[in-house]
Structures are given as structure tokens and as C-alpha cells.
Image: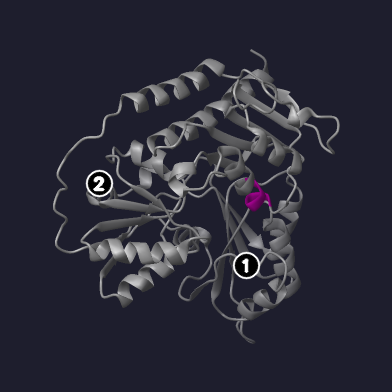
């Protein structure tokens, strides 16, 4: 097998994992990953049923995720891997996002818009055309779809009495691993198993995690920045009926640079119990091993990408505390350059990436030396935690 074929199969298997998670959540099993170089920048699975939205196809979700990750509206140096031939809507989105290469597994003889029924992505009349590769792990992709529809046809609604709900509902905030899945606590797993409903940032990430820890199937509700207000009201309503709700994010502690605050606030104001379990946190992990002072810490989350970033940095970097922030690997060099313009090149700093994973790295030094280090790298992988030492008072040096 050639290196190219091996690469295609590798990423198609990642898409199959997402497709299987969609099936577990009740959606047609289609999964998609978008790859830049050898790095997955976008993931998606069908979530039409979960979101009650007919446009939430795997390809659309993955494109949205990739654009958010890269910070650019065009994906003109990426490859899309999807388990089923895209429909007309998704083919149009591929053209509009300028994805140059499409690889899919199973053909769709009824609605496929890339080869089977239409050839939208390769239409010479359009302003962009994609190279199409078909049949990668076709048998596995087709089998997953066939099994899903066969099982659904066999399902018969059961006439059962509803089990009585517990007397008092609760909201649990359950932290999840930031990279290494062995970091899940026993208490967190027990809580997820006991919960009546799990509210998660992204069902595509949470479903495989729950399967790994043998958490029984139960309702999953998506909770993100676009539906936070409405979902917070629903969480309060469910708790009022006695349900036990577990809130998780994709990684780390819910509510810390992730959705969660509105649900917590709503439950507190309604008089319901909210409790947070201890667990993994990229911020705390990076601070502990950074070598920078930890007696006074200021965590500022993700800095603005463009507008207002200089004022934001000026506000926080002229103090004695160690400042901690999060940044995408695609923007961390630009952030460090902006920090250098505010602090000068000699301030102590650390960039921590791939925390708890195999290739964990702490880039320690001055702001200037870190800028020089990152400038020489062809690419940077893994979400980054940026720590900047406090400003020294006159006479402290």
C-alpha cells in the first residue's frame, strides 16, 4: 500500500469513528474530518436529529469547525474525508469553501452530488473545482449505514411505565481529560453513569468518550455558545422535575473558557444545587509546570483575535501577576509577537502545548526567544496555553 493510500485510510477511519458516534446518538451514521497537512482541523458528524436542523450534515459541521479552528473562511489547502458521498447542499459548501480535495467512502446512488447523480464539485462552470477520490474503505462505510437502517427497521416501541424521578434534581459540573484519557477520575465516571441526562459541548466528542468509560446510553443535549440561553432554561426545567444533569465540555472544566456559566447562574438563581467535581484543567496544569511564579495568577481565557487585542494585552500584562491565556496553534505565533510589542522581548514566558499527551512540550524562555523559536517551526500542533511572567516593580530586578 502506498503512503498516500495509507494516509487516506487513516483519516477515513477517523471519520468512521465520528459516524459510529452519530449512530449511537440516533443520527444517520455519516462522519467527516478535514485535514490540513497531517493535522485534523475540522470534525463533523450528522446531528440532524439531535439539533432538529436539516442542514446539520457531517460535512457542514466539519467545515464550520475547520473555519473556526483555522480562523480563515477558505479551506484551500485542506482535504475533506467523508464516509458517504456528499449531497447537493454539502457539495455546494465544498465549492464555496474552496476545498481542493475530496475523499469519500460509500457512494450515494440516490442523492450523491459528486459522482452518482450530479458532479457539482467538478463542474467546470463553477469558480472552484475539487479533485475527487472515491471508494476509500467503501465496504466499512456501507456496512455501518446498512446496519443502522436494519436496526432501526427492527425497533418496536416498548410500552413501559415511566420510572419515578428522584426527589431532588442537581447540576453536576464534570471535568473531562484535556488530552490523556487516563486522566478521567473515578468520581467523574460514577457521576456520568448516575446522571439522567448529559449536557455536552459537542455530542460528536462526548459520545466516543462515554463509550470508552462504559457509561450507559442516555440522552445527550448539545450546549454551546449559540444555544446557551435556551438550553440553560431547559436545564433548570429538567432539574425542577427531579432530573440529575451532568454538564461536560470537550476538555477540562465546564465554564472555564467553555460554555457553562449561564446554566450555573440560572440554576443558582432558581435555588437548585450546583456542584463541581475536581479534575483536569489546562490552565492549572500549565501553571504548575511552567516555572513562573504561581502565588498570584490572572487567567484571561482566549484573547481577542484582532480588534481590541492590543488594548486587551495592555490591560493585563502591566501587572505583577503571571498571566495565563489560551490560543490556537495557528495563531499562537501572532499572539506572541503582539505580546512582545507590549512587554518587550525580555519578559519571561512559557508556551505549553499538547498537555498530557505523548508530545507534550513546554517552550520556556523570554518572549523574544519564544517568538524566535516559533518562527523557525514549519507548523505548531496542539492547543496552546500561553503564560507571561508579571511585570517587575522598579528595584525588583
**Closer-to-camera residue (297/365):** 297
Quadrant where the image shows the C terminus: bottom right
Residue 344 position within the rendered picture, expressed as x and y whole percent measured from the top left: 74, 72
Residue 384 position within the rendered picture, expressed as x and y whole percent measured from the top left: 58, 55
Extent of the magenta region:
66-70
Is 33 rendered above or below residue 13?
below
> Between disc 2 and disc 1, whose residue precedes?
2
Q: Distance between the Cα atoms at labels 2 and 1?
A: 36 Å
Instruction: Name the image quarter holding residue 160.
Output: top left
**Given contact means CB atoms under 8 Å apart, are the residues at marks 2 and 1 in contact?**
no
Q: Residue furthest top?
A: 1
Name the residue located 75 percent from the left edge and 56 percent from the top edge. 372
Q: Which mark is residue 193?
A: 2
Q: Secondary structure at mark 2?
A: helix
Residue 237 position within the rendered picture, expressed as x and y whole percent measured from the top left: 30, 65
Residue 170 position within the rendered picture, expressed as x and y whole percent measured from the top left: 24, 63
Identify the residue position indicated by label 1 in the image: 303
Count of marks overlaid on the render: 2
Please say whether residue 239 is one of the residues in the magenta stretch.
no
Q: Secondary structure at mark 1?
A: loop
Amino acid at each position: 500500500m502506498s503512503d498516500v493510500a495509507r494516509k487516506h485510510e487513516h483519516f477515513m477511519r477517523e471519520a468512521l469513528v465520528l459516524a459510529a458516534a452519530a449512530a449511537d446518538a440516533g443520527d444517520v451514521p455519516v462522519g467527516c474530518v478535514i485535514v490540513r497537512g497531517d493535522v485534523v482541523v475540522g470534525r463533523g458528524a450528522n446531528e440532524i436529529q439531535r439539533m432538529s436542523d436539516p442542514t446539520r450534515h457531517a460535512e457542514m459541521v466539519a467545515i464550520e469547525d475547520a473555519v473556526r479552528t483555522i480562523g480563515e473562511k477558505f479551506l484551500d489547502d485542506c482535504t475533506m474525508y467523508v464516509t458517504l458521498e456528499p449531497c447537493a447542499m454539502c457539495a455546494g459548501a465544498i465549492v464555496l469553501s474552496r476545498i481542493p480535495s475530496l475523499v469519500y467512502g460509500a457512494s450515494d446512488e440516490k442523492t450523491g452530488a459528486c459522482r452518482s447523480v450530479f458532479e457539482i464539485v467538478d463542474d467546470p462552470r463553477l469558480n472552484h473545482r475539487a479533485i475527487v477520490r472515491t471508494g476509500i474503505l467503501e465496504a466499512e462505510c456501507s456496512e455501518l449505514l446498512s446496519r443502522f437502517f436494519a436496526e432501526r427497521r427492527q425497533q418496536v416501541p416498548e410500552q413501559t411505565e415511566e420510572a419515578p424521578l428522584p426527589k431532588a434534581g442537581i447540576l453536576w459540573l464534570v471535568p473531562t481529560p484535556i488530552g490523556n484519557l487516563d486522566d478521567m477520575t473515578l468520581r467523574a465516571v460514577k457521576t456520568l453513569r448516575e446522571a439522567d441526562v448529559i449536557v455536552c459541548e459537542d455530542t460528536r466528542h462526548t459520545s466516543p468518550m462515554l463509550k470508552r468509560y462504559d457509561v450507559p446510553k442516555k440522552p445527550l443535549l448539545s450546549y454551546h455558545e449559540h444555544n446557551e440561553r435556551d438550553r440553560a432554561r431547559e436545564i433548570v426545567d429538567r432539574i425542577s422535575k427531579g432530573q440529575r444533569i451532568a454538564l461536560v465540555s470537550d476538555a477540562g472544566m465546564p465554564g472555564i473558557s467553555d460554555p457553562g456559566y449561564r446554566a450555573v447562574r440560572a440554576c443558582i438563581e432558581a435555588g437548585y444545587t450546583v456542584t463541581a467535581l475536581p479534575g483536569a484543567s489546562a490552565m492549572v496544569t500549565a501553571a504548575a509546570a511552567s516555572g513562573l511564579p504561581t502565588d498570584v495568577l490572572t487567567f484571561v481565557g482566549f484573547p481577542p483575535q484582532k480588534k481590541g487585542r492590543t488594548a486587551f494585552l495592555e490591560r493585563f500584562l502591566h501587572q505583577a501577576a503571571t498571566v495565563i491565556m489560551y490560543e490556537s496553534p495557528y495563531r499562537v505565533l501572532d499572539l506572541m509577537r503582539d505580546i512582545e510589542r507590549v512587554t518587550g522581548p525580555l519578559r519571561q514566558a512559557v508556551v505549553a502545548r499538547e498537555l498530557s499527551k505523548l508530545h507534550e512540550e513546554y517552550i520556556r524562555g523570554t518572549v523574544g526567544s519564544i517568538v524566535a523559536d516559533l518562527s523557525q517551526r514549519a507548523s505548531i500542533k496542539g492547543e496552546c496555553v500561553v503564560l507571561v511572567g508579571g511585570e517587575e516593580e522598579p528595584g525588583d530586578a
